[in-house]
Image (cartoon, helix red, strand yellow):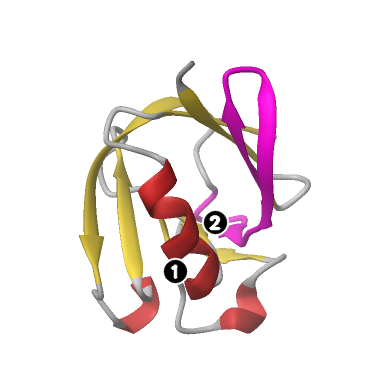
């Protein structure tokens, strides 16, 4: 079965599924009021290691240009609405997640 990601903006939660089976739940940070995380269905189109700065240890780009799932240099931002629209994760969490989700993985983002 194919893996997929479900992101709840309201719950600050990213859930990883293998088919219908929930594999893992991660706490996340999301966009602030002026730069909200966009709801919709996307796919992971690229990945990059060790970008540093506010992107943290790893980047997974979405099919929505300029948006992605990435680590953070500010772990206190997890669980809050503070980003420019991307989904932030603890660096150690995004490093664990990245090998489990290949390019082409579906990502559903909702309130």
**In the rendered structure, are the residues bearing label 2 and label 1 in contact, judged by CB atoms less than 8 Å apart?**
no
**Where in the figure is residue 92, as x and y percent of width and height?**
51, 73
Whole-number angstrom distance, CA of label 2 to CA of label 1: 21 Å
How far from the left and from the top, in percent, is residue 32? 59, 60
Q: Secondary structure at mark 1?
A: loop
Q: Quadrant of residue 93?
A: bottom right
Q: At numbered mark 2, what does the secondary structure look like: helix, strand or loop?
A: loop
The residue at which mark 1 appears reads as 71
Q: Quadrant of residue 17?
A: top right
- Tell me which residue sits at (35%, 74%) in the image: 57
Please tell me whether residue 103 belongs to the stretch shown in magenta.
Answer: no
Which SS does the magenta portion mostly show? strand
- Sequence-wise, the earlier of marks 2 and 1 is 2
Image coords of residue 35 (percent x, y): 50, 54
The residue carrying mark 2 is: 34
Magenta range is: 14-36
Residue 68 visible in the shown view: no
98 displayed left or right of 87: left
Residue lying at the far front of the rendered structure: 1
Q: Is residue 57 visible?
A: yes
User: Foreground residue, 72 or 2?
Assistant: 2
Residue 28 lies within the magenta run: yes
| Vertical comparison of 9 with 54: above or below | above
Q: Nearer the viewer, residue 13 or 94?
A: 94
In which quadrant of the rendered view does residue 81 lie? bottom right
């Amino acid at each position: 079965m194919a893996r997929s990601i479900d992101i709840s903006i309201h719950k600050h939660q990213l859930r990883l599924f293998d088919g219908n089976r929930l594999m893992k739940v991660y706490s996340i940070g999301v966009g602030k009021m002026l730069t909200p995380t966009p709801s919709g269905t996307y796919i992971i189109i690229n990945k990059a290691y060790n970008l540093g700065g506010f992107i943290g240890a790893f980047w997974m780009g979405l099919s929505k240009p300029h948006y992605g799932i990435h680590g953070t240099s500010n772990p206190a931002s997890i669980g809050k609405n503070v980003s420019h629209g991307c989904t932030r994760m603890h660096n150690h969490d995004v490093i664990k997640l990245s090998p489990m989700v290949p390019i082409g993985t579906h990502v559903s983002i909702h309130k």
